[in-house]
Structures are given as C-alpha cells and as structure tokens.
Image (tube, grey):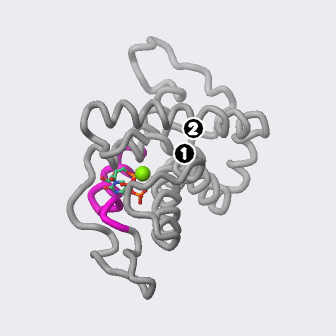
Amino acid sequence: MLPAYVPNPCAAAFGGGRPIDGGRVLGDGRRILGDGKTFRGLFAGITCGLIIGFLQVKLVSGGFAVFGTDLPSFGIDHAGSIKVIFTLAFGSLFGDMFMSFFKRRLGLKRGAPLPVVDQLDFVFGAWVLTYLAYPRWFADNFSFGIIITVLLITPLLHLVTNIFGYAIGVKKEPW
Ligand code: CTP
Ligand code: MG
C-alpha cells in the first residue's frame, strides 16, 4: 500500500501552481476540480509513489548490499510488483481527483471535509485501477484479511498524517 499512501502527502508537500482544471467551471457554476488539484501535486505525488515502490521491490529482492546476503524472494513476483507500483500511485491520486470532482458537484468548496470519502478515496482509486490492469496480481496480493485491515487502519493513518501536515504548515486543514 505504500506506493498508494505516499502520493497524497507528497502532493500536499510539493503541490501548488497551475490547477489541473485550468480554473474552468462546469454548467453548475462550480469548478471542475478546484485549486486543490494541481499538475505539480499530481506529478510530485506519482514520482514519490514510484520511488517508494521501487525501493520496496529492491528491498525484498535483496538488492541492498547492506543485508550482506540476498534475501529470499518470499514467492513474490517482483516483475509484477514493478508494474503495479504505477497503478497504485496513479490510481491513488486519480481516486482523490475523482472524488474532488464529486465534492465540487455537491457544492463543497475546496478543502471542505467529506468524511469517509476523504479518508478512503485514494485507496479505492489505487485498488480499482490495479484490479482493472492486473486482476491476477491484485487477487494474489490483496486477500480479504488484508483488504479489511487496510480499510480499518487507513482512516487512522490519514488523520494522523493530516494533523501532522497541518501542524508543519503543509496542509490548510487538519483533515
Ligand atoms: N494537492 C495538489 N495536487 C493534487 C492533490 C493534492 O496540489 N493532485 C495538494 C493541494 O495543495 C491540496 C493538498 O495537496 O490542497 C491537500 O490535498 P486534498 O486534501 O486532497 O485537497 P483539498 O485542498 O482538501 O481539496 P478537495 O476539497 O478537492 O479535496
Ligand atoms: Mg481535503
């Protein structure tokens, strides 16, 4: 899940500048996505997700000399994992954008909280894209128990991360 978790805080830390919707509004008079979704945030977030994912694969494939000896592969399909890093990272921010689109249609201003959705949109985005692109990998790696665990711990992780982001001035709201 790390390649899906990391893009959001990285988008918050490095985002800003030109909004993805170019400032455009829809027929309802509201922004398509809003100023909270920027190109810089998108690219910085995906890049961070890819970096963490490559490090993870490198770690379990025994690529780090610090361990002295090669670690066992644990039956993990490393080639498959590399491809899936991108769908996890991009899917995460795509899910986040997708729900911002709906928040704007509901009339919610940029940054307004939408409980549950704010805490889990990126998880669903990452899962749906990964499932569509690599259904076998998804089924092999996301067991029922893992899915339930992720759904339970993610909102908590999200809350703690955002309070921290707010405290250091990276996020405008503590949610
Ligand atoms: N961010 C960005 N580009 C993205 C996603 C996030 O620049 N694609 C940055 C923005 O600075 C944003 C911050 O990360 O304000 C926090 O993201 P999020 O909470 O998803 O955005 P909100 O500002 O709360 O906007 P929304 O109401 O649309 O969720
Ligand atoms: Mg928000």
Q: Residue furthest left?
A: 17
Q: What span is colored magenta in the figure?
A: 34-49
Report x, y in % for residue 126. 57, 52
Q: Which residue lies furthest to the top in this view?
A: 68
From this view, report whether residue 108 is shown above or below residue 32.
above
Q: In front here: 113 or 70?
A: 113
Report x, y in % for residue 174. 39, 39
Magenta segment's dominant SS is helix
From this view, report whether residue 26 is shown above or below residue 113.
below
Q: Residue furthest bottom?
A: 27
From this view, report whether residue 11 is shown above or below residue 74.
below
Say few, some or many: other residues with alpha carbon within 10 Å of mark 1 (under 14 / 14 to 19 / 20 or more): some
Which element carries disc 2, helix, strand or loop? Answer: helix
Q: Quadrant of residue 19?
A: bottom left
User: Which badge, 1 or 2, comes first in the chain's sequence?
Assistant: 1
Residue placed at 48% from the left, 41% from the top?
Answer: 5
Q: Is residue 136 left or right of 129 when viewed as pictured?
A: right
The residue that disc 2 covers is 155
Instruction: Count every numbered label the image shows and give the total.
Output: 2
Residue placed at 28% from the left, 75% from the top?
Answer: 23
Report x, y in % for residue 40. 27, 58
Look at the image and tell me whether residue 57 can be seen: no
Q: In front here: 134 or 116?
A: 116
Q: What residue type is labelled 2?
A: Pro
Say few, some or many: other residues with alpha carbon within 10 Å of mark 2 (under 14 / 14 to 19 / 20 or more): some
Residues tagged 1 and 2 counted as in contact (Cβ below 8 A): yes
